[in-house]
């Protein structure tokens, strides 16, 4: 009976250890890929950062592309949780978006620049675009038209007004403060509100 009682404990401890190793590998890969180009980071670099062997990474993720796919899914799920904003409140929506961009914007821009060369990143970017669109539909539900061409037009405008490259332009290229950049995005989103444009 004692042996039987110990077995589930051992299995649970082993599963927890496996999950901890997997998380450590993902964190190491994320840390490296936020600073360096995808092609410049090898499995050995990731293994060294995580304190594991290359074979351990292969056992968990099959290889670099598999690791990138899992990491992209993990980051996407984290983004969905972080971006909670009240519908229709432009300032709050922009503040939530900037919280995300200020933390991950530079890394996302680095990844996006590699879309044409790295299939794993292209898949991640496609998922991110779909997720951002769904977020826009949620937070601007009060102003978007019913499904159809007019809605697609408005979503295109709102996507452009909240795109990460606009954040990069204001914060990195033009050197605006976060306060000024947020105000600029708020003004832009207010100016493209279809409810106001349609009554002009």
Image (tube, rainbow, N blue to C red):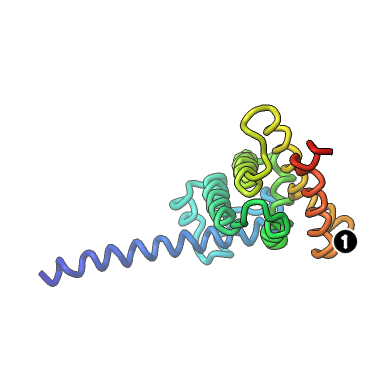
Q: In the figure, is residue 12 to the left or right of 187?
A: left
Describe the element under mark 1 as helix, strand or loop: loop
Q: Is residue 197 above or below residue 178?
A: above
User: Residue reaching furthest front?
Assistant: 199
The residue identified by callout 1 is 175
116 or 176, which is in the foreground? Answer: 176
Q: In the figure, is residue 90 to the left or right of 147?
A: right
Residue visible at 28% across and 63% down in the picture: 11
Image quadrant for the N terminus?
A: bottom left
Q: Which quadrant holds residue 103?
A: bottom right
User: Residue reaching furthest bottom?
Assistant: 2
Image quadrant for the C terminus?
A: top right
Q: Which quadrant holds residue 197?
A: top right
Q: Is residue 75 above or below residue 194?
A: below
Q: Position of residue 153 (x, y in %)?
A: 73, 33
Residue 122 visible in the current orientation: yes
197 or 50, which is in the foreground? Answer: 197
Q: Position of residue 139 (x, y in %)?
A: 63, 49
Residue visible at 45% across and 63% down in the picture: 21
Residue visible at 47% across and 54% down in the picture: 55
Total marks placed = 1
Q: Position of residue 195 (x, y in %)?
A: 74, 41
């Amino acid at each position: 009976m004692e042996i039987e009682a110990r077995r589930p404990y051992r299995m649970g401890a082993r599963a927890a250890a496996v999950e901890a190793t997997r998380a450590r590998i993902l964190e190491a890969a994320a840390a490296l890929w936020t600073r360096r180009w995808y092609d410049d980071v090898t499995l050995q670099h990731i293994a060294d950062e995580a304190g594991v062997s290359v074979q351990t990474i292969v056992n968990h993720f099959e290889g670099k592309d598999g690791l990138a796919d899992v990491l992209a899914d993990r980051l996407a799920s984290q983004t969905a949780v972080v971006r909670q904003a009240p519908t229709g409140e432009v300032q709050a929506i922009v503040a939530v978006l900037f919280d995300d961009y200020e933390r991950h914007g530079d890394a996302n821009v680095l990844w996006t620049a590699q879309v044409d060369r790295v299939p794993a990143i292209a898949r991640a970017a496609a998922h991110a675009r779909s997720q951002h669109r769904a977020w826009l539909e949620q937070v601007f539900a009060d102003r978007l038209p019913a499904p159809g061409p007019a809605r697609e037009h408005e979503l295109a405008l709102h996507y452009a007004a909240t795109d990460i490259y606009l954040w990069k332009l204001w914060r990195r290229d033009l050197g605006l403060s976060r306060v000024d950049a947020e105000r600029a995005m708020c003004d832009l989103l207010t100016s493209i509100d279809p409810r106001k444009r349609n009554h002009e």
